[in-house]
Image (cartoon, rainbow, N blue to C red):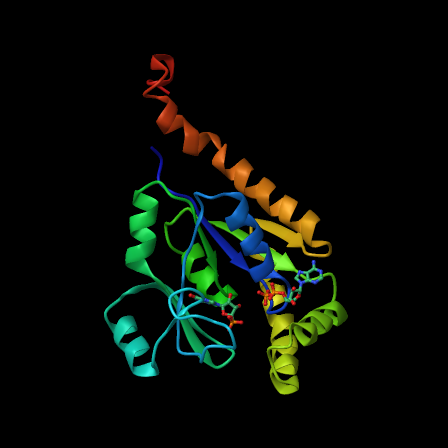
């Protein structure tokens, strides 16, 4: 059994990351999606423990001090973090894990030794991003404009990711994302250690 692969997915808010993550979680039943901790308030319909673990700023600070996050960052005025223990447990069990996190958190993982795969989702353009954020009907005009302003800086970070996926048509983008996951699972360096127990001729390689 190999260690689970970590797929880190970032995108400007409204690019379609949640929609795409749902597609791949439905498609690969064995893929796990990490539920982050956040200090932000739940949006309408969001459930504690499902969408996020909603915690107070004091509790979040305690978790940071206790080194309970593998990465954390302040995004749009709220704190978000990924639980280290859940991630380690799943990967040790051989389960591949998807993290939907911002560029600051992704950069922290890029500088660590997780061997993670970095995927950036782009909208087809800024106007379409605004249309999607407005159409989602979850945020005020001020929040939407702040997210669009932030998108510029986030898109600049796309350069150092391993894969870029433009979410124009959802089905096509979902197909590309599935393709990346399948290809990464076939990488020689991930498969070879497992095959060595099956094929003696590979043992001395
Ligand atoms: P994010 O998680 O990146 O903030 P969402 O997945 O919530 O984005 O998508 C933002 C809005 O855009 C949602 O209303 C979603 O249904 C819509 N959306 C997502 N992908 C597409 C697409 N390819 N074409 C049109 N609308 C999309
Ligand atoms: P939202 O509030 O719209 O759910 O998420 C806002 C941003 O926070 C998104 O870019 C999302 O990817 C990011 N985010 C969610 N969870 C985490 C996390 O655990 N760590 C980091 N660094 N970012 C996160």
17 relative to 150, above or below: above
Question: Furthest-front residue in view?
Answer: 45
Question: Furthest-left residue in view?
Answer: 66
Give the quadrant of residue 166.
bottom right
Question: Furthest-bottom residue in view?
Answer: 142
Which residue appears at 58% of the width and 43% of the height? 178
Residue 38 lies, in percent from the top left, at 40, 73
Which residue appears at 76% of the width and 71% of the height? 127
Q: Is residue 62 left or right of residue 143?
A: left
- Quadrant (top left, top right, bottom left, bottom right) of the N terminus: top left
Q: Is residue 2 left or right of residue 100?
A: left
Residue 19 lies, in percent from the top left, at 59, 59
82 relative to 185, above or below: below
Frontmost residue, 91 versus 120: 91
Frontmost residue, 24 versus 60: 24
Frontmost residue, 16 versus 186: 16
Residue 20 lies, in percent from the top left, at 59, 55
Residue 13 lies, in percent from the top left, at 59, 69
- Quadrant (top left, top right, bottom left, bottom right) of the C terminus: top left
Which residue appears at 29% of the width and 50% of the height? 89
């Amino acid at each position: 059994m190999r260690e689970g692969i970590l797929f880190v997915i970032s995108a400007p808010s409204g690019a379609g990351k949640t929609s795409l993550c749902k597609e791949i979680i439905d498609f690969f039943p064995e893929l796990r999606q990490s539920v982050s901790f956040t200090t932000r308030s739940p949006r309408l319909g969001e459930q504690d423990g499902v969408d996020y673990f909603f915690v107070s700023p004091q509790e979040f600070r305690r978790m940071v001090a206790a080194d309970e996050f593998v990465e954390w960052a302040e995004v749009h005025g709220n704190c978000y973090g990924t639980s280290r223990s859940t991630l380690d447990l799943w990967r040790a069990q051989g389960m591949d894990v998807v993290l939907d996190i911002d560029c600051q958190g992704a950069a922290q993982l890029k500088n660590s030794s997780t061997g993670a795969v970095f995927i950036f989702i782009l909208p087809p353009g800024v106007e379409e991003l605004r249309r999607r954020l407005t159409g989602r009907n979850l945020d005020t005009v001020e929040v939407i404009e702040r997210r669009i302003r932030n998108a510029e800086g986030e898109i600049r970070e796309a350069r150092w990711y391993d894969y870029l996926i433009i979410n124009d048509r959802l089905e096509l983008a979902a197909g590309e994302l599935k393709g990346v996951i399948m290809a990464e699972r076939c990488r020689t360096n991930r498969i070879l250690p497992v095959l060595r127990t099956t094929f003696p001729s590979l043992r001395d390689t």
